[in-house]
Image (spheres, coloured by chain):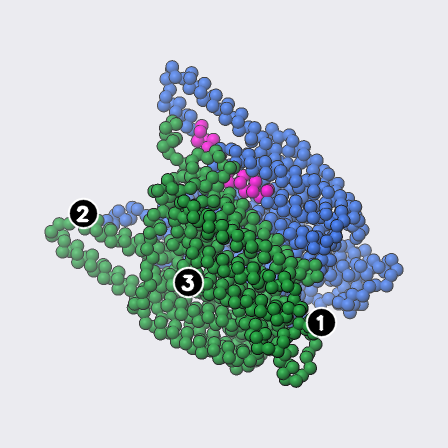
Chain colours: A green, B blue
Amino acid sequence: MSDKKDSKPCHHCQSRSASLPADTTTVHYEKFWLYRHCSSVEQSHRQAQKAGQLFSGLLAMNVVFLGSAFISSMIFNRVAITLADVWILLSVLKVLCVFWVIYYLMGTSRKPHAILYRDSHAGPIWVRGSVLLFGSCSILLNVFEIGYSTILVRCKSNVEIMFPVIAILFIGTQIYFLWHHSKDCIQVQHNFTRCGLMVAIATNLLEWLLSVTNDSLHMEMESQLREVEQRFIGKAPSSHPHWCNETAMCVCPNTTICRVFQEGYILLYPFNTEYSLVCSSMLYVMWKNVGRTISHHHSLEKRPKFKLKGVLFGPVLGTSAVIIGACVFMMYQIQAATLDPSRQVLVIYFTYYIVLLPLMSVCAVVGTLIHALEKKELDTVQNPTRSLDAVLLMGAALGQIGMSYFSIVALIASNRRDLLNRLALAYSVLIIIQNITQNVFVIDGLHRRHVEKEEDSKEVQNCEACRQRRMSVLELGQEIRKVSLSYIHTYSHLTWKRRVLREISFFLVLSNIILWIMPTFGSHPLFENGMERSFYGYSTWFVIVNFGLPLSVFYRMHSIGGLLEVYVTA
Amino acid sequence: MSDKKDSKPCHHCQSRSASLPADTTTVHYEKFWLYRHCSSVEQSHRQAQKAGQLFSGLLAMNVVFLGSAFISSMIFNRVAITLADVWILLSVLKVLCVFWVIYYLMGTSRKPHAILYRDSHAGPIWVRGSVLLFGSCSILLNVFEIGYSTILVRCKSNVEIMFPVIAILFIGTQIYFLWHHSKDCIQVQHNFTRCGLMVAIATNLLEWLLSVTNDSLHMEMESQLREVEQRFIGKAPSSHPHWCNETAMCVCPNTTICRVFQEGYILLYPFNTEYSLVCSSMLYVMWKNVGRTISHHHSLEKRPKFKLKGVLFGPVLGTSAVIIGACVFMMYQIQAATLDPSRQVLVIYFTYYIVLLPLMSVCAVVGTLIHALEKKELDTVQNPTRSLDAVLLMGAALGQIGMSYFSIVALIASNRRDLLNRLALAYSVLIIIQNITQNVFVIDGLHRRHVEKEEDSKEVQNCEACRQRRMSVLELGQEIRKVSLSYIHTYSHLTWKRRVLREISFFLVLSNIILWIMPTFGSHPLFENGMERSFYGYSTWFVIVNFGLPLSVFYRMHSIGGLLEVYVTA
């Protein structure tokens, strides 16, 4: 009886061991002092993993809640909790993170057998590239902030120059860390690494929350810019009861450098928000990968390469969309620089979207239909990276969809019936439809890709097997004819659908690229047309837009990644 | 070759068919016009299920976003979107829901083979009971609102009486529906039912959001109550710039009935919030169960019965906690009725919590340690009901924890160092610790329960098998001695740990009951002590408390359910 029991491990271990690699000698299994009575090393490893994830998750939750309470207190009671208090809290967290990252680079990752596996799906080049881009912009933003504070040093405390310095240090370290280590599946010091990663995630989330809600510097600068403007025109400055005490002493001197700092700050602000979001998602993937062992088969899995072959309409249509979009964007930017975007340029901007978005929606719907027509089956096997992709796509779309609904309600309720209002309304409705249809298409596509490859190879194997079995001189001719006929039939049948899928996904990739560029580099018509801003009030609409816009930029980025996968595997 | 292919279905179908019942002839498999090319009926059924869930989920998402935008617009721009507009939207949704529920009761559920299975885990009696309780209170609340509006009919529009009538109709229908049909796994008209359920969920969520954020009626009543009071004292009414125009005409006449309506409204308000939350979670489970087929084995699974045996300290300690708590609660309520809760009663209230919470935390930690010491393994098989339980526990705890962090920041920042402040601070910190430790204990316990039962029966079977095999006259004596010794050893070893686990979970059940009763029936010291309220401002703290309190009541309710499971299966 006992023999029988030993030879048959429990089903947990069985299911686990299937995904374990052969060279288990070098793997550091996790241990946890609570779980010493487990039947097997692997079982104890899994329980320790769960416990470690739970505790580091609780740590992050508490840090995030504490920080959120700080930030909310600052918003609702500016006397008791000041922006400086929030900055002190964030700086402490950032310094902690920097120390942990240095320890990770110097200590943890250099231990023997520390990094046995690397997750090939984690941190693809376009994500790391955007971390580099957004991070560099964030560093520049902080440099501008230092410059601005230095000029106005009389009315700013000295401590305020310290915070951007710490921020620059933090951003720089994090870029280096994510660039080189985002694929790591670390196998030593599991719990310490998890806690470090979770503190870093919490810090990035709090940084995001602060930049979403804190409009104080914007308000200050906007009122100053307006004043300077009016001084140029010759009018008396309009009364700003909130700022009039400070502006007497703290007004930006009328030098070019100060204006550059101000406008650069406003231009670069969205990048910082974006940077925190992207870092959080990458750190989360790293956290999921702590202690993960990847089977040999999986780690060697080759991803199909990107080939530009057999597509024509997609690239042509997409490229023209990009070129027209770039022209609209430049017109918009030139106009926006004059601080008074005319109605005309807003009309052109909205019209461009109103033409492009229905086209994209129709393409996505057609793509979904073709997916459904194909005889492929849904791949419902668990796949953490893909699940995260789908959740991120859906979650990021919520930002854009929510912003559109807010805009729709404001536009309908304000009840003005001019052309611009109608265009803005159509724009918001179409954005919602486009987001939803595209999400359905991409997620559907992601769930199909792997199965097909398997089926292809299976079919080839089957043919091989049946050939060997039935081979005889007489049947050979018939057999070859049958096989090749069915092959040609399948191929011609597939290529039609595949070609359309590739055209569609290529077009969508290019369209998403231009829709990504426009808000990223500074066109925010929803903020600048002023209708919703006057409806909800400056602060509220600032929060809504600052919440929605980075998510929508993030959404476009992720869509491009997802659509490329669909293209490559179609 | 083709024979071989037919006889070996793909692994998706295999894994599915394991959970399918034998009598498949009466099951209505779902179909979806998009997926006609599937290899099997079951595969097409699964794809149709996914598609139906996706589309009904998207419908709900859009309704929720539209409603949220309406409610936010009302908050930030009371001129363009009024409360009446929001009520019209909600009433339309409620009428739709009522029609759908009537159709479900009359049409869908009476079709042949409509309800073949019932989910035994869904809608346990304590959840349905709380729906009945909270729903009745909500109906009463709406009756009070009608009465209040009737008295002040001069300054209220007639439409305002319509809304509570529709609300009463909606609540009544929903109570009946959830009481009788919450266990249904409906097998016909899948997509229509999913959409109906999702609209109902969205309506409940919007109702919750509105009651969390809409403090207008509270403000109106509070200012009136204060005025009436001051008129009694003989002072001139203090100036309320916001309300002074309306109060001239719309003040509640000084009759008993009007005061009853006002105070009843304020007392019953939290129940309505709670009701929407509980309904949403029940409807969500029903939505998950649409089209679900439950295997015969699973549906007949008997749950262990509740037995009060072998526990002593837990009930004694718990009962004394309940009795003391009830006394504190009554003292608090009597004082609170005078509209000026004295410091003394707040001190007693906080002291009670400060004694009870550490005791509960220690018990939960000890329980977790004992769980870890046991040789049971974690049950990591997928179980949707249990996953939902764990997510709801964690999610509901967030409300309480968030509120505590807000309170902590306010108390520290306001920097007053009297006894009451320190007590409130200790209370908030202890609440966080207690929530976290209890969650870890309950979730750990829920993940262990099923395995043990299986192991017990397996051991008995194994013994039986080995006995029959090795049975011989000589070995019989030795065998019996060996088996009984090991049995006694196991039993005595188990009972010690089991007894402690049962004591702990029994104590925690009783403590959670009293902690559930106190906030549910009206003690809100965090709102009434006034410290946080003056720190964040009335409206903000109203939102925070109205967001956190119903979640914390919901959390206690769910903890009691979870702890009872742990007790019964320990």
Q: Which is more toward the observer, A131 or A147? A: A147
What secondary structure is marked by label 2? Answer: helix
The answer to whether the residues at label 2 and label 3 have Cβ atoms under 8 Å apart is no
Residue A419 covered by magenta stretch: no
Location of mark 1 (residue): A245
Q: Nearer the viewer, mark 1 or mark 2?
A: 1
Whichever of labels 2 and 3 marks the residue nearer the N terminus, that label is: 3
Residue A18 image position (x, y, % from top left): 36, 43
Do we see residue B473 in this rendering?
yes
> From mark 1 to mark 3, how far is it between C-alphas?
47 Å
Residue B38 image position (x, y, % from top left): 35, 55
Say which quadrant the C terminus of chain B sits in: top right
Q: Residue at x 46, y 69 (%)?
A: A516
User: Is label 1 on the same chain as label 3?
Assistant: yes
User: What amino acid is at disc 2?
Assistant: Arg
In the picture shown, does residue A168 fall above or below A335?
above
Q: Residue furthest bottom?
A: A234
User: What amino acid is at disc 3?
Assistant: Trp
User: What amino acid is at disc 1?
Assistant: Asn
Location of mark 2 (residue): A469
> From mark 1 to mark 2, how far is it between C-alphas?
93 Å
Q: Nearer the viewer, mark 2 or mark 3?
A: 3
Magenta stretch bounds: B437-460
Q: Residue at x 60, y 28 (%)?
A: B310
Q: Residues within 10 Å of mark 1 (few under 14, many from 20)?
A: few
Q: Residue furthest right?
A: B234
What secondary structure is marked by label 3? Answer: helix
Location of mark 3 (residue): A126
